[in-house]
Image (cartoon, rainbow, N blue to C red):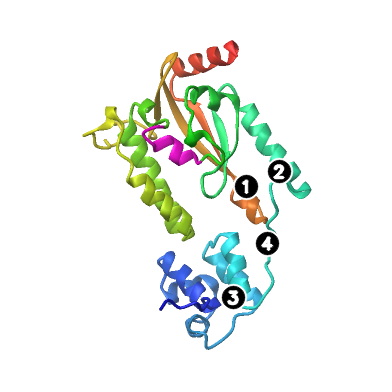
Amino acid sequence: MMSTERPTAGALLRHWRQQRRLSQMALALEAEISQRHLSYLEAGRAMPSRAMVLHLTEQLRVPLRERNAILAAAGFAPAYGERPLQAPELAAAWQAVERILHGHMPHPALAVDRHWTLLSANAAVFRLLGGLSGPLMQPPVNVLRLSLHPEGLAPRILNFAEWGAHLLARLAHEVQASSDAALLRLLEELKGYPPPPQARGARAAPVEEGGIAVPLRLAGVAGPLSFLSTTTVFGTAVDVTLSEVTIEAFFPADDATATAMARLAAAG
């Protein structure tokens, strides 16, 4: 029979310490507390104060959502609000996201939540997705699923072995960092997708000598396109929802791609 008991604050703190691969001594030194006190907290022999929970979770870089969960387990109210993106309090931040997406034209940029659900995108993204339809394009759209599914963007990715390996490695890192069960399920799902025809039998090659990053190479109506990706987050967010918004922006990796995207934008 499965236990229905909720984990204690101490057990959650121990979980995150182990996730970060820190010994009790290492965390105690970083947090400037005694190892004995930390041991008592993790074992439930002492209850952490609200200030101690916030202090330890800050040292452990625990996501805001999970910090609230540890506070609740310790009997305290959440420290971080969680408002919907449409809330008036987030209007200025969401306008900033939309300005970034629009200002990145004619190159693609999109915003996703913690589970890679598409929140917004500029027109360049939809130009590159032209011709795709079916369930993968029905809201809520999962960007990773759309990218790697054989009925999605995968057949158009010229370096699928490298790009797919990059996305899976990044998602695995996010699973490790967040302990998010939904992300783990997504990772297992994506690993099970068959490679598209152009990638069958191919292995991810190391970045070319002199290279700086793994590019995304796409087959497009204007010829092969090559992009470098960047990630932007709200570094000072104290709202759970806002802290989980990520902007993925793609820059042309060569002059031919820059010219092609400008022509696509001009053509409307």
Give the quarter of the image for residue 57. bottom right
Inspect this view and state whether residue 236 appears.
no
The amino acid pointed to by label 3 is Ala
Q: Which of the two discs, 1 and 3, sits closer to the camera? A: 3
Q: Earlier in the sequence, mark 4 or mark 2?
A: 4
Whether the magenta-drawn stretch holds residue 147 is answered as yes
Q: Earlier in the sequence, mark 3 or mark 2?
A: 3
CA separation in Å, label 1 and label 2: 9 Å
Instruction: Tell me the element at label 4.
Output: loop
Q: Earlier in the sequence, mark 1 or mark 4?
A: 4
> Any mark on residue 109, and which?
none
Please tell me whether the stretch drawn in magenta is mainly helix, strand or loop: helix
* Residue 243, above or below 229: below
Expressed as whole percent of the image width and height from the top left, the position of residue 198 reads 28, 27
Asked if the residues shown at circle 1 and circle 2 are in contact, with their CB atoms under 8 angstroms apart, the answer is yes
Residue position for label 4: 80
Residue position for label 2: 93
Q: Which of the two discs, 3 and 4, sits closer to the camera? A: 3
Q: Which stretch did the figure color magenta?
A: 142-151
Residue position for label 1: 234
The amino acid pointed to by label 2 is Ala
